[in-house]
Amino acid sequence: MTLILTFLGKGGTGRTTVAIAAAKQLAEQGQRVLLLTQDAGPAFGLLLGAEVGSAPQPVSENLQAVQLHSTTLLEQNWERLKQFEAKYLRDPFFKAVYGQELSLLPGLDDALALNAIREFDGSGEYDVIVHDGSGDQATLRLWGTPEGIDWYFRRFKAVLQSSQFYRSISPFIQPVTGAILSSGNATDLWDQPATQEVNTLVNRGKALVTDPMRLRAYVVTTADESAIATGRYLWSAAQQIGLTVAGALLNQADSAGAAESAFSPLPVNALPTKSDRWQPLMAALPPLTAPVDVPAPMTVDVAAQTVKLFFPAFDKKQVKLTQYGPEVTVEAGDQRRNLTLPPELKGRSVTGAKFQLGYLIITFG
Amino acid sequence: MTLILTFLGKGGTGRTTVAIAAAKQLAEQGQRVLLLTQDAGPAFGLLLGAEVGSAPQPVSENLQAVQLHSTTLLEQNWERLKQFEAKYLRDPFFKAVYGQELSLLPGLDDALALNAIREFDGSGEYDVIVHDGSGDQATLRLWGTPEGIDWYFRRFKAVLQSSQFYRSISPFIQPVTGAILSSGNATDLWDQPATQEVNTLVNRGKALVTDPMRLRAYVVTTADESAIATGRYLWSAAQQIGLTVAGALLNQADSAGAAESAFSPLPVNALPTKSDRWQPLMAALPPLTAPVDVPAPMTVDVAAQTVKLFFPAFDKKQVKLTQYGPEVTVEAGDQRRNLTLPPELKGRSVTGAKFQLGYLIITFG
């Protein structure tokens, strides 16, 4: 089982430096570590003091590093998509498009990165993957992707299948899907093996994101006021995607004092400013792979008919709760979550909500 | 006509601070300025010293500020998409989905931000929009979106229309599109008014990005080695989307000396460290709206049958040139560009390419 570490925090707080120190520390402890950056620029290699390429390569004992290049990933994945298409479609039509000519649009790079991490995670070659991403909302969107895709898939399937549009074209569906798909007697795209394959991937991704022994975040901050405010914001926003923040790291500081109350009840560790040597910084890190003892993002109490959501740094005004049709939706930290409820609470009406000691407590009737 | 300013640079170099100073300076000069941030966190408001909301609000004379909230934008745009759908489709099917429940996936936030900027740009209410984005590859992907969409549209249209798939379903297209679209005698989705409307938007976006009197970038750096290297990288990568970098700003420095050779031939201005007062920082900024005199990202010489691309900070190994089918593709800075060639060079073969004084010079036969 691989544990993925990711770092959140304002730009310039030293996230990448801390990620490198974490990777070095874990490798020294005998863990097989992959240090992975999404930044294609030169800063990562300069900080690490090693050349890094688009495939993992050894840096020191137990430590490999890789710099994701979206253009390279796009080519590789396009070839795979074409194979996937050829497997399921009678006459694949993307064969005429070359991976080397595909333009990169916003979001594509994150989708490609997530897929690359998934593959490294599943390879069995690493005990720990240290992820150096943008550390902001974009990183939260990245880790929120599996739940987001799952929601779109479920919701739009239901909407489309009950629409007049679907009924209008249903007489044509059998001949059209028959002409498209390799299987001649196809009925519905939703039930095809290709769709099932994607579904399995999405469910695995959802399970990974909410398990702190598979994925956890640390907030990196300095004593600077806006860095602490940004760190607290991201800590709270992480709860919206079910991502556990295991601790705060106060960088360039002698003691944790300046951040302890801001991040209570998280453990806070002070990290010294990086000097010529990595050792002091590595030695100051907390145990990064140990079990965590922090509040869970979401707790369900079926008997009491309540759901508790942890929002440590938001107040009542920053959280919006709505119920539309089948969905109970929480909006906070510029992120939206449609709650996945246990069967006992599904379809029930929200009868109350209150903010108490950093928790949004929702009661169902 | 509105001019958009955007800032590129490594995290922690003070991009947001410089953006605020730029907005204040231009407002003081009498320009109607909108300062727009894509960061939904609290740091922007703390730095600006004012509360900022998801709609523009006055900060001081001539200066308004807005903080884009993707969740709010998603709701608004979903309502508009539903109106758009209702206008063109006989039976719109998204009416059953509420904007308030839509999850945010990677890329959606950038697409929404781009659309919001487009609307502010078109409103006629601002002379200058100062854009505070992530300042990295993600910002370049954002501004590269119109060209990217245009390419996907053109290329996939050609591929689909010549595919066996398209021929298989073409007998069904008339009745299906007739059932879907408001117009009963529809023939092809590619020729629908909805498609034309999107096309027009994309072409306007393309024209904006490559005109330095409509959009320009400044690189923000400190004297730190990796900040300069990142700034140079982003400067070069910006050329790939046709975005003009008008100058470099060396932040927290007394003189421009430390960055002048790295960014030659760009003008470099030294900016003092921000103190309690904004005035010294504002006064040190270059004229941000003046015509620029820097190398163009792409120059075509039809008589000599050459195309010159400006890549100031890359070497030969970092740039890849390929020709597949109808496309001449250049890959550099983890960005890919399919060259838009004049009719005289279109469809011609690349016969040579060389690197000379920061330019990739491509010769056609």
Image (spheres, coloured by chain):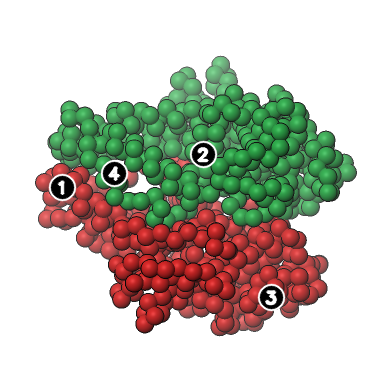
Chain colours: A red, B green
**Residue A284 on image: x %, y %:** 73, 77
Q: Amino acid at mark 3?
A: Val
Residue at the spot of label 1: A167
Residue at mark 3? A268
| Residue farthest to the top, as pictured | B303
Residue B135 in view in this figure: yes
Q: CA distance from mark 2 to mark 4?
A: 35 Å
Q: Is residue B103 above or below residue B254?
A: below
The single residue placed furthest to the right in the displayed view is B254
Q: Residues within 10 Å of mark 1 (few under 14, many from 20)?
A: some
Please provide percent x and percent y for residue A313: 60, 66
Q: Secondary structure at mark 2?
A: helix
Task: State which quadrant residue A272 falls in.
Answer: bottom right
Q: Please tell me which residue is depicted at 66% across the width and 78% down the height of the picture.
A: A267
Q: Amino acid at mark 4?
A: Phe
Q: Is there one chain holding both mark 3 and mark 4?
A: yes
Name the chain under label 3: A
User: In 3D space, how far apart are the residues under numbered discs 3 and 4 (Cα atoms)?
Assistant: 54 Å
Query: Of the residues tagged 2 and 4, which is closer to the observer?
Result: 2
